[in-house]
Image: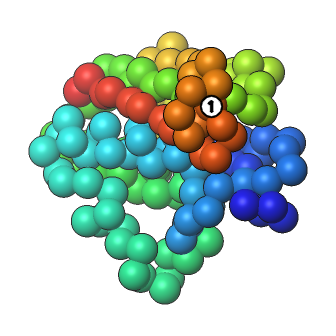
Amino acid sequence: MPGRPLILGGAAIPYDRGLDGHSDADVLLHAICDALLGAAGLGDLGHHFPDTDPELEGVPSITLLARVGGMVRNAGFELQNVDSTVAAQAPKLAPHIQSMIATIAEALEVSPGQVSVKATTTEGMGFTGRGEGIAAYAVAAL
């Protein structure tokens, strides 16, 4: 979406457009939130933070991640690790990976060694390859 900042992993990524969404549309953090909630049997992000809630409009996803981390801890779980992958043809994300890892670890109150963020392309295939969007996948071990 032209004119909107691109936020991934809590980091502002220099690019000419961002993702459309009710919050800041950080697809990486949304995937991590869903992985954590799912691993703890706590449902999904939309259940806890619906896009129909006007108070959540424009909310930084890092705020949601910190809240999800607290929910997981309050349910009696401890994060062992979270592994994630971002699929984007552009922009190149490698220069921002360490910043993303540090931001995610801080929000989850864990060591950066417990957080993995990888970036890949789809070699021009699909909606991500055409530059129409960005996808993210995550798995969490509790």
Viewer-closest of 130 and 73: 130
Residue at numbered disc 1: 129
Work out whether 87 lies above or below 65: above
Q: Quadrant of the N terminus?
A: bottom right
In screen coordinates, is 12 left or right of 104?
A: right
In screen coordinates, is 133 left or right of 110?
A: right
Work out whether 1 lies above or below 87: below
Q: Quadrant of the C terminus?
A: top left
How far across and how far down the image is residue 8, in percent? Answer: 64, 42
The three-letter code of the residue at mark 1 reads Gly
Q: Residue furthest left?
A: 41
How far across and how far down the image is residue 18, in percent? Answer: 72, 54
Location of residue 119 (image quadrant): top right
How busy is the neighbourhood of tag 1: few (under 14 within 10 Å), some, or many (20 plus)? some
User: What residue do we see at 86% from left, 42% from top?
Assistant: 14
In screen coordinates, is 67 left or right of 112?
A: left
Determine whether the residue tagged by mark 1 lies in a helix, strand or loop. Answer: helix
Residue 83 visible, this angle: yes
User: What residue do we see at 13% from left, 45% from top?
Assistant: 41
User: What residue do we see at 40% from left, 56% from top?
Assistant: 67
How far across and how far down the image is residue 28, in percent? Answer: 52, 40
